[in-house]
Amino acid sequence: MIRFNNDYNRGAFSDIMQALSEDACQSHAGYGTDDWCDKASDTIRKLIHRKDADIWYFPGATQANYVLIARALTSVQSVVCADTGHINAHEAASIENTGHKILELPNKEGKIDADQVKKVAEAYYGEEAEYLTEPKLVYISFPTEQGTIYSKEELKNLSLVCREFGMYLFVDGARLPYGLGASNNDVTLEDLALYTDAFYLGGTKCGALFGEALVLLNKDLKPRFKAYMKQNGAVMAKGWLMGLMFHTMLSNGEYFEASKRADQYAMQIRAAFEEKKIPLMADSYTNQQFVILSDENADRLSEDFVFEDCGRDERGRIARFCTSWATSEEEVEKLISVIQEL
Amino acid sequence: MIRFNNDYNRGAFSDIMQALSEDACQSHAGYGTDDWCDKASDTIRKLIHRKDADIWYFPGATQANYVLIARALTSVQSVVCADTGHINAHEAASIENTGHKILELPNKEGKIDADQVKKVAEAYYGEEAEYLTEPKLVYISFPTEQGTIYSKEELKNLSLVCREFGMYLFVDGARLPYGLGASNNDVTLEDLALYTDAFYLGGTKCGALFGEALVLLNKDLKPRFKAYMKQNGAVMAKGWLMGLMFHTMLSNGEYFEASKRADQYAMQIRAAFEEKKIPLMADSYTNQQFVILSDENADRLSEDFVFEDCGRDERGRIARFCTSWATSEEEVEKLISVIQEL
Amino acid sequence: MIRFNNDYNRGAFSDIMQALSEDACQSHAGYGTDDWCDKASDTIRKLIHRKDADIWYFPGATQANYVLIARALTSVQSVVCADTGHINAHEAASIENTGHKILELPNKEGKIDADQVKKVAEAYYGEEAEYLTEPKLVYISFPTEQGTIYSKEELKNLSLVCREFGMYLFVDGARLPYGLGASNNDVTLEDLALYTDAFYLGGTKCGALFGEALVLLNKDLKPRFKAYMKQNGAVMAKGWLMGLMFHTMLSNGEYFEASKRADQYAMQIRAAFEEKKIPLMADSYTNQQFVILSDENADRLSEDFVFEDCGRDERGRIARFCTSWATSEEEVEKLISVIQEL
Amino acid sequence: MIRFNNDYNRGAFSDIMQALSEDACQSHAGYGTDDWCDKASDTIRKLIHRKDADIWYFPGATQANYVLIARALTSVQSVVCADTGHINAHEAASIENTGHKILELPNKEGKIDADQVKKVAEAYYGEEAEYLTEPKLVYISFPTEQGTIYSKEELKNLSLVCREFGMYLFVDGARLPYGLGASNNDVTLEDLALYTDAFYLGGTKCGALFGEALVLLNKDLKPRFKAYMKQNGAVMAKGWLMGLMFHTMLSNGEYFEASKRADQYAMQIRAAFEEKKIPLMADSYTNQQFVILSDENADRLSEDFVFEDCGRDERGRIARFCTSWATSEEEVEKLISVIQEL
């Protein structure tokens, strides 16, 4: 059985495993105050051309999302996001658990646009009614939960409306390099650093054993940030593990290359499905491909592959096929050959 | 510089590093539903002789503490613990952040006793006053934050008073094997499984890269436990990493042996301090030794060693010297030789 | 200027004012443990034919809503309600502030139906996914925020689906007697006591100075309820004031009669609007009438009356005209005469 | 039976009752945006000589306490108060329920002093450790829960240490006029406005049916304050009731006179106890007197009077005798005559 169900089913880049082994007998300062974290953070600051950015390492993405939001908002402020946003649909109400309402907007292939956000902002800021909470932060995912990406123009427009109304723009980058590596992408790391107030470079799904590197750009978000992390159990004792992993995969470039390759594999798989007239759920150019399978086809594919069951619509079973930094050419060829025989 | 400042300044047992490397090319089911976690959990259930226990893996101890407590309590229930308890003094009010009051009791060398707990329980349960919160869970650390341990008798008495009043007994075991391995210890893993409602086997400080294995014994705590973990970002995508690490170090016995050795080293260091009439803060037989140093002695030791600065009392600087699963005989000899020359 | 903007712009029934004056020199037990509360609660228990009900008095409806919900739910459970529900749209995210997600359903004239609830319940209870919160409580308003009411059949069906899936049904009765008194109503107080787990009889909008009488029916909601109230500042020191007011207006029947009269007045006003072909927003038979006015008509009505501005749609300005227990025949006649001249 | 158990066992000043009756047929704007609240707030601003103060009316004191604190603090900030502080000992963990830790200081007759606060502040601000929460607000009660009061000097010193470390000083004034009217008091309303960031004038215990008037002085606390109130159900629909009551009793002076008279009565009662060598718990010059009674004396007094049972110490039963704005000369004489016969 080959796992195409997600992008977090295998360990880490071999360079990372080797670096970890070599480092195992070294001792380090705790809680992220070590040299590896310093190195990784410098590397990130250079990549995004923002010397002033604060970088923080989280074990997982749910924590990165809700801790940033808990830090950014008062209890009478709320989050705006797509109804399909990860924080709204997959994280067990972690945001509400910290006391904040999510104002969900109907998505278009996983995305929301500046006009939708503007309407919400105008409705509130037009009257500052005390019976409503202030929509203070816009959360988007890049790529989205459906594999789609925002264009530079779309990102810029979201940024402009946020700045007009004094709202934060926060980008969930759990799969960031898969977005950056997509053939239809025109957004760069520097754009993200320019247009957002905070975003993160995912590690868990992109070649590290675990870890997300959060980039804080807006200075209002920086004071006492580590206390919020600590309060939510997000400061790892052996923080250097994440510093080592991010430094390794960012400085050797594998972080970006492996994701790009995964995107290309995904497009080959997509092409195979399209050739068979198997419908797609969204126009994704990244590593996640959502297709609608007949029961027969789903059963056939299940014999050799693990893929994610995403429910049903009236046309059939919705299935996610996901490549990753670790996916091999052979695995892809095997999958395509089975698709072709459907 | 040799680090004696804590027990989480080095990576992991070499057996663990090797197992991780060998496993790196395997794919696994996500979120702790994999074979490694199953194996590790079976191993733990056998060690504690409780087939019915639920085992959950947390990336870190702060999460394990506050998620268990959030699961156990309603918002009108509170926690009883020592004023020096880790949740009260070191975790940035994570418990209050989830809405619960901590009723702190004055510690004796880091410990509280059954009589103290009984008084709190009687005061509340005598009247069930609506202006007070119900003291529903007793939190202790084994060993404590000062390196001391509870005897089997003390643990049993705490357990009895908890059962009398319908309270949970929860043991923070971030350093559990250092307690079990102490020369004055008479508590076994089976005792913990008998006398508590939940406890955990620490990984981060005891030879794993990270991770804590929480053992849920009381059936009232089990339903929907994973949703609480998810809501607080405590379910790791690559949960198998923790399964692999716990299985490895528990089944080869190194988890217990290395900690016991660390305790023995700590006692040698303690003896060296005592010989020099350097006062101890607490009567610790575990890997943490708190001593009171003159400025001169502290400065001398700082030349070669990193130790933890714990403030001052009227007698001088309070310093923690901590051995770990990774401490070597040479390091200990080096430290002792410097102490002898003070 | 005559206020038709809401039903809480005047003090209280004259019988209540007199009873308060007569009682002013008496001393009472505090925090609702007095004779007046006992009397009022007995009166309510008789009206609903449920001797087992617990009755609690809240100063205001927002508190009654969120405290009941905080009591009913764990942090991994959520509320289902109409998108227009008062707790979702008018109470500054009080529910999310206590840590709970609201799953909003699209309303039909302010209402939701059993099928909608069933779909949500099935989606969750079909898999009990740990990344979702459990939809444990259904909140409806009777009458709704648009003045419409549920029929006995609709209420029963909601109740059945709730019982099927183990969910609570909670009815916000801030305007309860206006619903009971509507010409199209077939729901009785006994029906509410039969079909719901908790509901309240509004006082603030129905003839008392303030206060809501919450009826707890499901025994799972009863233990320690007062502690939740206390924790949220909802236990009034002089609780007897609410006991006195509810007892007075319930036992003399004015609570029901005055609301019924207000409904009749509202229907006369509605008829006047309809005669003028002024469109209604919803088919309301209760004291709230929502109409869509041209700017010209709105301006003309503003000269003599205060009404509530509810924004705009493409047809014009949405205005609420609200009668109350205190509305007089003359005021209604005056309004109708102006409408007729539009 | 005469009630001396508390100061909230009777309705309201007769002037208030009359004003309420006269106003009953008037209609008003809702949610505190009415003329009565404007008048009352102007009256308060004049009394404290602070035109810039924002005034907000709360139904009860627990709400006033926790909403102010929720507004003032982020989730990584905490409250400093006496262990006997009302928010710590009588309000069902309402502060922790909103996510904040209370750092309790040992009281001296209900009070804390500037040195104690300074020590806490220095410990934190010396290192801004991320594992601690920031002690950002100091809460005191005037008078305290034991009936004692702060001198102007003590208040000023608390204020200075708060300003030095950037902390807020908040005074719970649920019994404020009983403190101002005490024979040993040298604090004025203007002093409170000068030395604190927020305080309130209690209504519930001082002659109103209910209500507390919160005075916001520090401009950092003002933005969006009403949204916090709304979110916690503290904005009364008929807010004008509180405006009317505060305006009435403040402008006719009865608020201050009746409390002063109650203090004098309390001192007569105290003198009677002292003559009988019955020990006092605290050196109170206000309306609350705590004495230690033998069982025999307690039983004798219970025959004619209701007083509050506050537990036991080694000397006997602790009892609170409380006069109020409504206590009559006859009631006091009756009590004294019985004390004299003990």
Image: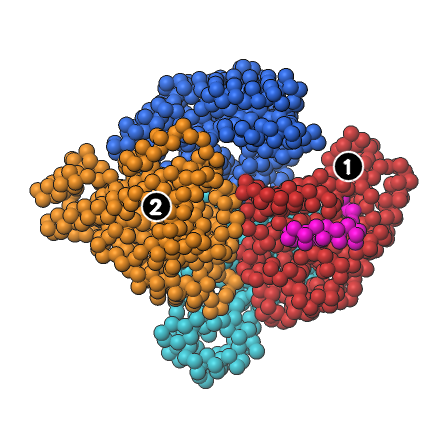
Chain colours: A orange, B blue, C cyan, D red
- Location of the C terminus of chain A by quadrant is top left
**What residue did someone put label 2 on?**
A202
Q: What residue is pinned by disc 1? A: D318
Q: Are marks 2 and 1 in contact (CB under 8 Å)?
A: no
Q: Residues within 10 Å of mark 2 (few under 14, many from 20)?
A: many
The picture places residue B217, in percent across and down from the top left corner, at 45, 26
Q: Please, is residue B333 above or below residue C315 in the view? A: above
| Pick the front one: C105 or B45 | B45
Q: Position of residue D168 (x, y in %)?
A: 65, 53
Q: Is residue D26 left or right of residue D262?
A: left
B175 relative to D287, above or below? above
Q: CA distance from mark 2 to mark 1?
A: 62 Å
- Element on which disc 2 rests: strand
The residue under the point 38% across, 55% down is A49
**Which residue is more in the foreground, C298 or C204?**
C298
Amino acid beneath label 2? Gly
Is D149 inside the magenta-drawn segment? yes
Residue type at mark 1 is Ile
Q: Are marks 2 and 1 on the same chain?
A: no
Boundaries of the magenta span: D146-172
Chain ID at mark 2: A
Q: Is residue A4 above or below residue B336?
A: below
Task: Report in which chain the residue with disc 1 lies.
Answer: D
Q: Nearer the viewer, mark 2 or mark 1?
A: 2
